[in-house]
Amino acid sequence: MMVCSIMMYFLLGITLLRSYMQSVWTEESQCTLLNASITETFNCSFSCGPDCWKLSQYPCLQVYVNLTSSGEKLLLYHTEETMKINQKCSYIPKCGKNFEESMSLVNVVMENFRKYQHFSCYSDPEGNQKSVILTKLYSSNVLFHSLFWPTCMMAGGVAIVAMVKLTQYLSLLCERIQRINR
């Protein structure tokens, strides 16, 4: 039980915790939509089975927002990962064989931005990044919940080991008392 929780701490530490600590978009701000448009298409590849990859395309949605706190015009990304995949696109649909399906999904996202023009976003308080993100992949709430259960498992393991040791000690103590009484 304790070994499993230690492995979970290690796994979460090198994946989730590292990504959370490296994120520079920490300040929750208000953004106002300036422009949302599909600018171009990009090539992508998708899996069609084992050892099978096919090429497709996806539309690139660019969303520019006004960061209310500073008045800057910035490019909005869906998540931190979106920026790593393609720095020109705010939203990237999953690559699939049907371009029209990807296009309709991007149109729905674009219409939602136009419908709700004021929304929360995350910005870099130091101003090093000239972009904002809409959704944090690893918020403090996600971090808490992912570390809470391994901690409970570790505490349970420690409690079991402590109870076993206490039982062993009490058993030895009882045996000594019985020897003295004989």
Image (spheres, rainbow, N blue to C red):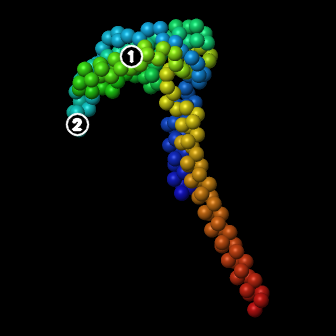
Residue 24: x and y in percent read 57, 22
Residue 80 appears anywhere in the view: no
Query: Real-space Cα distance between discs 1 and 2?
Result: 34 Å
Residue 12 appears anywhere in the view: yes
Quarter occupied by residue 91: top left
* In front: label 1 or label 2: 1
Spot the residue most to the front. Answer: 115
* 182 is higher (above) or lower (below) than 38: below
Look at 62% across and 18% down and name the residue there. Answer: 125
Residue 101: x and y in percent read 27, 23
Task: Judge left or right: residue 179 versus residue 65.
Answer: right
Task: Judge left or right: residue 160 versus residue 116.
Answer: right
Quarter occupied by residue 140: top right
The quarter of the image holding the C terminus is: bottom right
Amino acid type at mark 2: Gly
Which SS class for mark 1?
helix
Look at 61% across and 63% down and name the residue there. Answer: 160
Amino acid type at mark 1: Glu
* 26 is higher (above) or lower (below) than 14: above
Residue 9: x and y in percent read 55, 45
Spot the residue most to the bottom. Answer: 182
Residue named by callout 2: 49
- Tell me which label, 1 or 2, sits earlier in the chain: 2
Rate crowding at label 1 as few (under 14), some (14 to 19) or many (20 or more) other CA atoms within 10 Å: some
Residue 104: x and y in percent read 30, 20
The quarter of the image holding the N terminus is: bottom right
Residue named by callout 1: 111
Look at 54% across and 37% down and name the residue there. Answer: 142
Look at 62% across and 16% down and name the residue there. Answer: 126
Rate crowding at label 2 as few (under 14), some (14 to 19) or many (20 or more) other CA atoms within 10 Å: few
